[in-house]
Amino acid sequence: ALLERAGERGTLAWLYFNNAGTLQDTRGADDEARVLYGRALAALEQLGDEDRIEAVFTHSNLAQLEAEHHRFAEGIAAQREALAAAERLYGPRHPMSATLLYILANMLSEADLLAEARTQGERALALEVELHGEDSPALAPHLALLAKLANRRGDYEEAATLASRGLAVLDEPDFFTVRLRHILGEARIGQGRVAEGVASHRAALALARERFPADNFRFLEADINALDRLELGTFDLVLSIGTLHSPGIDDRAVLRQLFKHHLEPRAGLIFGFPNCTYRDGELRYGAKMKNFRQPELSLLIKQVGFYKKYLQQHRRKVFVTGKHYLLVTGAAE
């Protein structure tokens, strides 16, 4: 009805295409969403004025869609378009600019463009301080991002300072309290203050238990190598992503424990192994090896091969899928 009234042009057409794109994005139909966002922008172009708030929303929606699917170059470009349009409309000191800068900084961080991510994140933080003051809870997301970036570059002192400041500005615990506690824990461990770091992680777990007290949630602090001490019971599905490849874990012993004590007869298992890193914004597959310039795949292939064979020996139909993460799925035959 909107399209019929609008003749596929103007703000009503934009409203239809943008909202339909958001719906398809939410459903995971990214190709359809991308087309609809493009048609939304085309409807605005027919009005002869691209500097509209509607264009800001659609460019940013498109940017986040691209980033979610690891198309960071396209996502970052679209987010820059959104930011530029907002600044042309309202000037660089508008609250919307702080939000758009924060989204851009997150994308740059995910693409491993850490220097520019820090620059844009600091711009966003400075603008929030100017708009809301030094003690506003609105600073928490920006401080969390900058603290995370500091951890990634090994500046643990700055990371701890930023995370502590973020915790101080929050009036009451929320999602960012958990995130900041985790970041602070990483920073303290990086500083060599391991006991304080572990305590910060424990505080994050305690808050999670408080916020999600239902019976179907359990947040445990334990050694994966000692599953037998936890009295976990049995499960229909076991999911482990980015865990069992860690050098401190005896994955063979963990697998034996799972199959002996924690699986229902027809339980499924999914194990995920990282298959890529980002260096200077470039996606590189495989694992980084000492004395070898290029990422290398043999260790990953060997590990995936072991898990596939092990699951087959335990009467599971095995599928290996994925791209950025390889997923080894074992389903009951």
Image (tube, rainbow, N blue to C red):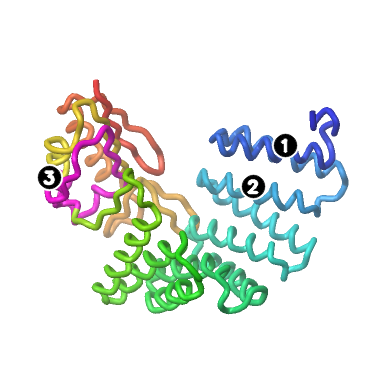
Q: Residue at x 69, y 59 (%)?
A: 83
Region of the chain picked out in magenta, as a range: 224-252
Residue 278, above or below 15? below
Q: Secondary structure at mark 1?
A: helix
Q: Residue at x 40, y 69 (%)?
A: 151
- Label 3, label 1: how many angstroms apart (C-alpha)? 53 Å
Asked whether the residues under the numbered discs 3 and 2 touch, taking CB atoms below 8 Å apart as contact, a structural biologist would say no
Residue 48, above or below 186? above
Give the number of the disc on residue 17: 1
Q: Of the residues under marks 2 and 1, which one precedes in the sequence?
A: 1
Q: Amino acid at mark 1?
A: Phe
Give the number of the disc on residue 61: 2
Which sits in the foreground, 70 or 268? Answer: 268
Crowding near pointer 1: few (<14 within 10 Å), some, many (20+)?
A: many
- Label 2, label 1: how many angstroms apart (C-alpha)? 12 Å
Q: Of the residues under marks 3 and 1, which one precedes in the sequence?
A: 1
Estimate the x, y position of residue 315 in percent, counting from the top left.
Answer: 18, 24
